[in-house]
Amino acid sequence: MDILYICAVNITFYKMKAFFEGIQTLFVDFLFKPLDWMRTLELSNWWLANIVSWALMLICAKYVIYWCKELKKHQDNNEENQDTTAHSFLK
């Protein structure tokens, strides 16, 4: 009876091992290939290799400027309550 239990545990272990090796294969062999390409590209052209970083910085800058314009618009319309007791829990 103990042999059957050990065999069942081994089969479950190998199924889980195969599952996690499948996840490893998915990420290492497929999803991270563009990042490997960018890492090798960095040796020849630093600017092109960091294009993702530049794109994210531009997107963030756009939304910071948008947010500042919205804050300015609300301040010009006197809609902003700058009282220190604006919330009831601060009283």
Image (cartoon, helix red, strand yellow):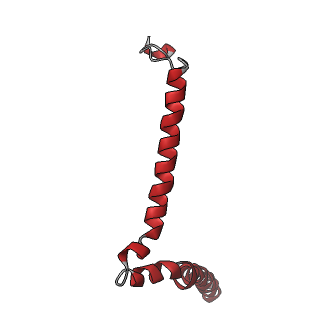
Q: Residue at x 50, y 23 (%)?
A: 75
Q: Is residue 32 above or below residue 56?
A: below
Quarter of the rendering containing residue 44:
bottom left
Quadrant of the snapshot with the N terminus: bottom right
Measured as percent of width and height from the top left, residue 11 is found at: 63, 86
Measured as percent of width and height from the top left, residue 22 is found at: 60, 83
Q: Residue at x 45, y 69 (%)?
A: 51
Q: Is residue 77 above or below residue 34?
A: above
Q: Residue at x 47, y 77 (%)?
A: 35
Could you tell whether 40 is left or right of 63 in the image?
Answer: left
Quarter of the rendering containing residue 25:
bottom right
Q: Residue at x 41, y 83 (%)?
A: 41
User: Residue extending furthest top?
Assistant: 91
Q: Is residue 69 above or below residue 56?
A: above
Measured as percent of width and height from the top left, residue 63 is found at: 52, 46
Quadrant of the snapshot with the C terminus: top left
Q: How many callouts does the rendering have?
A: 0
